[in-house]
Image (spheres, rainbow, N blue to C red):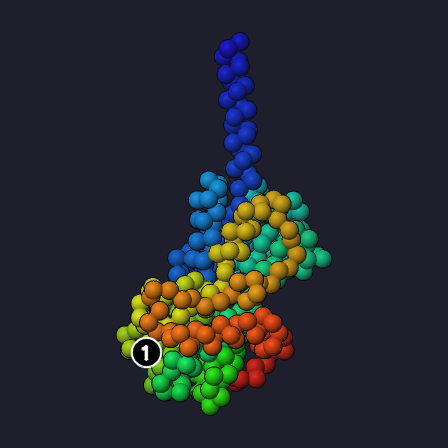
Amino acid sequence: MTVLKSLLGASAALALSTGAALADPALIYDLGGKFDKSFNEAAFNGAEQWAEETGGNYRDIELQSEAQREQALRRFAEAGFNPVITTGFSMSTPIDNVAGDYPDTKFVTIDGYVDPEEHPNVKSISFAEEQGSYLVGMLAAMASETGTVSFVGGMDIPLIRAFACGYAQGAKAVNEDIEVIANMTGTTPAAWNDPVKGSELTNAQISQGSDVVFAAAGGTGIGVLQTAADEDILSIGVDSNQNHLHPGQVLTSMLKRVDVATYEAMQAGEDLDTGTERLTLEDDGVGYALDENNRDLITDEMQERVDEARQAIIDGEVEVHDYRSDDSCPALSF
């Protein structure tokens, strides 16, 4: 009898532990790697914060190819992970293909979009990148000594053009005569992980007079920031706070709180509210980084002017055009 009770107890414990595991969240990183020091790493940091604070567990995977997107979604869903969180707009179509087959699983696409009416078990999270980019564009213009600043994007898509457009608008709000140079790394997902090309583009922009360069290019941006430091010009990081990568050389970083979006999705778990959500300056979903690594680069006057602009945008007194609204930019030609 004692042996039987022990066996039953062990079985029950196994069932409970299995059930707990099946309710764990999962995280799928976009191409570029978990430790890209930018977009994907922000998601990782949010997941780690959740795990540390709650004692919970999560499973993650770094994709190596486009073909793995749908496969990873299905494997996590079939294993019972919930929610399944993804980073990058390229997960939109795979989630659209998969979500209907797993109606009890919540899926999250950070930076992507899935029709909430067609797939009520999906949450699409977007950001007002143009607003945060406007602020760092102002800082770039105020810091520039040459009157020329530049932008290196990753994959040439509307999302990245929104970064560039907001940046140009902010720069021209400070100096209407400033020149803004913008280049994209490529037209395929490989553009997110090509630091050599990022370096080449930065050098080309420096030769055209740029003394502040903003990188919105995932892992490619590491090459941009490194080259800027080597050539003794200022750079601007993106997504995560990248100020520490080259202290005194990174003017600021345009923060995009992918970490917060990931953390909150994991915290909500199976009770996650689905639909669409857009995080703005007002939500602290975007912003700029100020810390000990760049404090000496940003004067009190610069900070005051940018913070005033931030509040004006929140109050609706300043409207930053979003390239994605009509595929055009009033401050920059692509």
Give the image location of residue 90, x and y in percent.
54, 62
x 55%, y 29%: residue: 15
Q: Which residue is mark 1?
A: 233
Decide: is 20 above or below 106: above
Q: Amino acid at mark 1?
A: Ile
Q: Kindly state the secondary structure of the residue where label 1 is placed.
A: loop
Give the image location of residue 150, x and y in percent.
42, 80
Q: Is residue 323 left or right of residue 190?
A: right
x 48%, y 44%: residue: 58
Of the pair 262 and 298, the residue shown nearer to us: 298
Disc 1: CA contacts within 10 A as few (<14), some (14-19) or many (>=20)? some
Q: Is residue 80 left or right of residue 146?
A: right
How many marks are shown on the rendered structure? 1
**In this orientation, does residue 115 appear?**
yes
Give the image location of residue 312, x and y in percent.
57, 74
Of the pair 199 and 329, the residue shown nearer to us: 329
Decide: is 54 above or below 119: above
**In this orientation, does residue 194 appear?**
no
Decide: is 300 above or below 52: below
Q: Which of the 4 quarters of the picture holds residue 230?
A: bottom left
Of the pair 122 and 144, the residue shown nearer to us: 144
Give the image location of residue 206, x and y in percent.
34, 83
x 40%, y 66%: residue: 290
Which residue is situated farthest in the bottom direction here?
177
x 52%, y 20%: residue: 9
Which residue is situated farthest in the top direction here?
1
